[in-house]
Image (spheres, grey):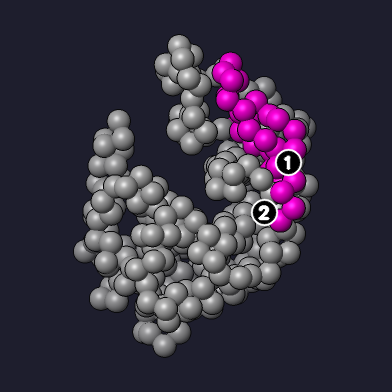
Amino acid sequence: MRAHLQDQVRNLVAPLVPHFSVGGARVRLGVNTAIHDDTAAELESFARPLWGLAPLAAGKGAVPHAELRLRGLAHGSDPGHGEYWGEPRDRDQRIVEMAAIGFALALAPEQWWDPLSGRERDRLARWLCAALQRETADNNWHFFPVLIGLGLGRVGVPYDRSLVTARLTRLESFWLGDGWYSDGPTERRDYYVPWAMHFYGLLYDTLTGLRDLDDGREGEIVDCLPGTNVLARRTALPMLTGQLPPGAHWLRCAVLGAPDGPEAEEAWRQPPDPPTNPPESSMRGGGT
């Protein structure tokens, strides 16, 4: 199964290679029809595959065209290079994509950080730090500086942790109970809630060892795999007990671990029953 999933990641990213720029920092897939600028769109195409490539590297899988992607990290974060990604501004799409880079540094620094030269590391760190104080949309976007901070912390870059703590506190305010969130101060209970709030909460708790970034606060135990003995601590973010996207049950098993013994096979094969409706239910979509 592991080898199959690793091959799937490689197959997914293989078609991107002909679309890389010479410097490796831009991936142009066609005409940009998004509301953000072309540079941000080409950064997006560069960074999004890191959500798969970072776990691939962490699992000791061979990363295809790794040198090309490292060259992109070095050139894209260099203000003196022609393929510079640009400074992040308030509510900038760049902040979204920088989270993927932060995640990669947090999960597999030996792949994405260690091979860079000292100056390249300094430039990448400066560029990532610039996003921490920028305004974001008041919703799941607060997670992006959190993930950037996780990457910076993993590679030993100092930064103002109070900026991340403020984000976590705001995300905590969206908690509705029983695993449900609102996506900001809105009536939205679905869409970016399962795709962002639960998923990024899982990553945060996993990468921090289920402990808060600053004060080591431990919270209540929550049942994140109903019907099994797999639990997680509610730290800054409660998670994993409400509406989740397709495949999330197996994601949780893979990251948190299915129970040992005869329950393991059943946990993998039989997801839990569908969750109940969210508090003050509103299934309208929307988001950023």
Name which residue lies at 36% across and 60% down. Answer: 111
**In the rendered structure, which amino acid carries the disc numbered 2?**
Leu
- The answer to if 95 sits in the magenta stretch is no
Mark yes or no: residue 95 visible: yes
Where does label 2 land, which residue? 213
Residue closest to the eye, 213 or 286: 213
Name which residue lies at 29% across and 76% down. Answer: 23
Q: Main secondary structure of the magenta part?
A: loop
**Left or right of 244 in this view: 281:** right
**In the rendered structure, which amino acid carries the disc numbered 1?**
Glu
**Residue 112, position in %: x, y?**
39, 63
Q: Which of marks 2 and 1 is nearer the N terminus?
A: 2
Q: In which quarter of the image is residue 235?
A: top right
**Where 224 falls versus 145 (above or below)?**
above
**Where 213 falls versus 162 (above or below)?**
above
**Left or right of 75 in this view: 87:** right
SS for callout 2: loop
**Residue 77, position in %: x, y?**
44, 76
Circle on res. 218? 1
Which span is picked out in magenta?
A: 214-243
